[in-house]
Image: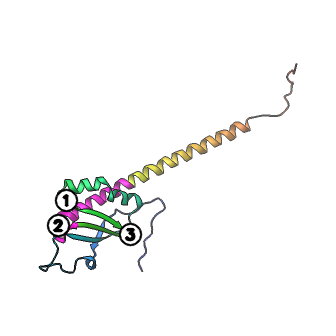
Amino acid sequence: MNTTTTADDGDVGVLGLRTVLVGSLPPALLTAAAPDRYTVEAVFTRRPQQDEVAEILGNDTRSFLSEHGHPTVELTVSDRRLGIANTNLQELRDGLASLIAVRLADISAQVKTKHVIAAAQSKIASELELDRAAEVVRLAESVDFSVPSSPASTD
């Protein structure tokens, strides 16, 4: 049995794709009736995080694909599957798959960096709050309600 665990600090591997889901391909492939373009589903190496899904579906990814010669390709995410619409296996084999892999790796790195920065900021804020609370306690403890040895005049 294979199990996958994720560390509490969000340290997960780079998001990538494993394989094409052959069963999701049009049944007429490699026949005269085969469509020129169709949707190819591929399996992610792990479940994408919410931030990663947003980036995969976002304008930066559309622009990236368009800038690299694939303006009609559209990506969708369903659980652990990436849908690559308006393409074909030949186009994927001839470079589109590598472009998608590069984009997924970039997205993973960006999201991880954001999470690391957010965790560091949270830790700093928590430490500052602990320091502030300790200073409040020290200040409160410095208050002395004892009667002084020479009472002050109360005129």
- The residue singled out by tag 3 in the image is 79
Say what secondary structure mark 1 lies in: loop
* Residue located beneath label 1 in the image: 70
Q: Residues within 10 Å of mark 3 (few under 14, many from 20)?
A: few
The mark that comes first in sequence, 1 or 3, is: 1
- Judging by the rendered image, the residue that carries numbered circle 2 is 91
User: Which of these two is toward me, 57 or 35?
Assistant: 35
Amino acid identity at mark 3? Asp
Q: Which residue lies furthest to the front in this view?
A: 33
Who is closer to the viewer here, 109 or 31? 31
Q: In this view, does 123 lie above or below 5?
A: above
Indicate the position of residue 115 as horizontal and vertical percent values: 43, 53
- Contact check, label 1 and label 2, Cβ < 8 Å: yes
Q: Residue furthest left?
A: 32
Q: Distance between the residues labelled 2 and 3?
A: 24 Å
The amino acid sitting under disc 1 is His
Q: Magenta span covers which residues?
A: 86-111
* Quadrant position of residue 138: top right
**Of 125 and 77, which appears nearest the observer?**
77
